[in-house]
Image (cartoon, rainbow, N blue to C red):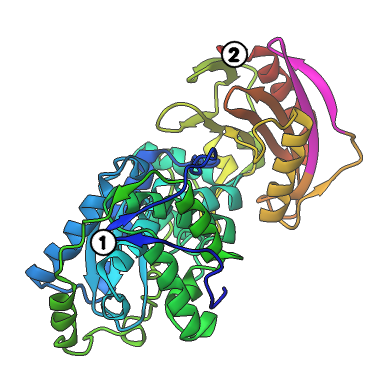
Amino acid sequence: MRTIWKHTVILIGIAFLVAPALAQVHQFKPGFNLFSKDQDVQLGKEAAGEIEKQVEVINDRELNAYISSIGSKLAAQPQADKYPYTFKVVNDKSINAFALPGGPAFVHTGLIAAVDNEAQLAGVLAHEISHVALRHGTNQASKANLMQLPALLASKAAGSGSMLGQLSQIGIGLGANSVLLKFSRTAENQADLVGAQIAAQAGYNPVEIARFFQKLEAEGGSRGPQFFSDHPNPANRMKAIEDEIRQMPQRNFNADTGQLARMKAIVAKLPPPKKTPAQSGTSTQGGASTQTGPSTPSGGSTELSIPNSRPSGRTQQYQGKDFSLSYPSNWKTFASQDASGVTIAAPSGMQQSQGGVSVGYGTVLAYYRPKDTNASLWQATDEFVSQLRSSDPRMRAGREMPREIKIGGKNAIVTTLYSDSIFQGQTEADRLVTIPHPNGMLYLVFVAPDSERPYADGAFDQMIQSIRFRF
């Protein structure tokens, strides 16, 4: 962060004038995600309920109406993507705000006390709304749990237990370091730029969000206000926001209600928080942690048995959103809500415990969107394998070299990887098949103990030969 503005911002009356430019404002789309938008909303509601049990939500009608009014203006902008946003105030003196997947947002009283004007408060809220709309939380969770999430989300779609509880079993909770709430610098940069756009369209001067970040940096940087602990500071943050503002159309910034001073007075009179992080056993700085006991997928079992997991010779048909295939008749399907992906396995080949949902004998079929939309299939496959290996450090390549094959008339790549199996004392063989798809890449992972290859390979080959695509 720099302490001196290097570009001139011209204010004439209440109009913010920008020179005509050929460049356009940035447009970002949500990245790769194994969650559906409905699952984002469901997860956010469950998480908000847990957080409200552990923090002190302010029950002041005037203050709540004020925050909700600002939030509603921002949420009405097209970039907010029509999620069911809610805005609540938490009695906490730290300078912070956070939003959960699907829309619930929380503002600390410390933030209200710290801002110099309503536009700065609106800018921070717009920043949080951008995280929701760009689905940064579930995007990060998806990339970190490529193998475990498809089965977990499929079992949740079948109506089994709390989504938040199941996610906590694979390490996706709501603590201070949760992937759902602690974003990368790239995600923060996107939220800055989209947040500036949202704030401007709602009638707030977007330069104020940059000024507020500058103020926080001057008051203590990453060791000071909590906001920077939860929101990594992208390089040249203020300059990036200023450059974005230059590309925005001219408009009047007249949304300020003039009520901030009154709200600050209300906040100043509030008693100390009745609940503190030490009392609740959690941290309100970016979320609350929650743990629930393990549950079993609908029709599932935690009793592992290799013989009972082996594929039978008989098959039945599965119809997905844009594909179909045959699978062993003694295996069960756990489809995603929109049928875009599916996990197929014997219940005795799946394990759900403190370690989460894992497939030890079966097939996972889902989609992956590479960072570069123009990436070749080989490039996308290499990127995906890197993601798999980063989420499971024990995963390793075998002697078999990746090779190209044809599946359903389409080019495909087969890559064999090895890891530790959920079956004790066994090595797991993962045959990864990747296929180009209009939305990125379709992948199938055929999972089995390496000792079972004589039984598994025939069934997997039969499944591959049976696949028919509708894209």
Left/right placement of residue 114 relative to residue 259 reads right
How far across and how far down the image is residue 187, in percent?
A: 53, 55
Residue that appears at 49% across and 27% down:
340
Q: Which mark is residue 328?
A: none
In the rendered structure, which segment of residues is drawn in magenta? Answer: 402-417
Q: Which one is in front, 207 or 414?
A: 207
Looking at the image, residue 461 lies above or below residue 252: above
Q: SS of the residue at dot 1?
A: helix
Q: SS of the residue at dot 2?
A: strand
Res. 138 in view? yes
**Would residue 336 be counted in the magenta stretch?**
no
How far across and how far down the image is residue 358, in percent?
A: 58, 47
**Would residue 408 be counted in the magenta stretch?**
yes
Residue that appears at 65% across and 18% down:
313
Q: Badge 1 is on which residue?
A: 49
Within 10 Å of disc 2 (Cα), the crowding (few <14, some 14-19, many 20+) is some
Q: Quadrant of the N terminus?
A: bottom right
Q: Badge 2 is on which residue?
A: 469
Left/right placement of residue 89 relative to residue 99 reads left
How far across and how far down the image is residue 247, in percent?
A: 48, 46
Q: Name the residue furthest front.
A: 12
Q: Amino acid at mark 1?
A: Gly
How far across and how far down the image is residue 227, in percent?
A: 43, 74
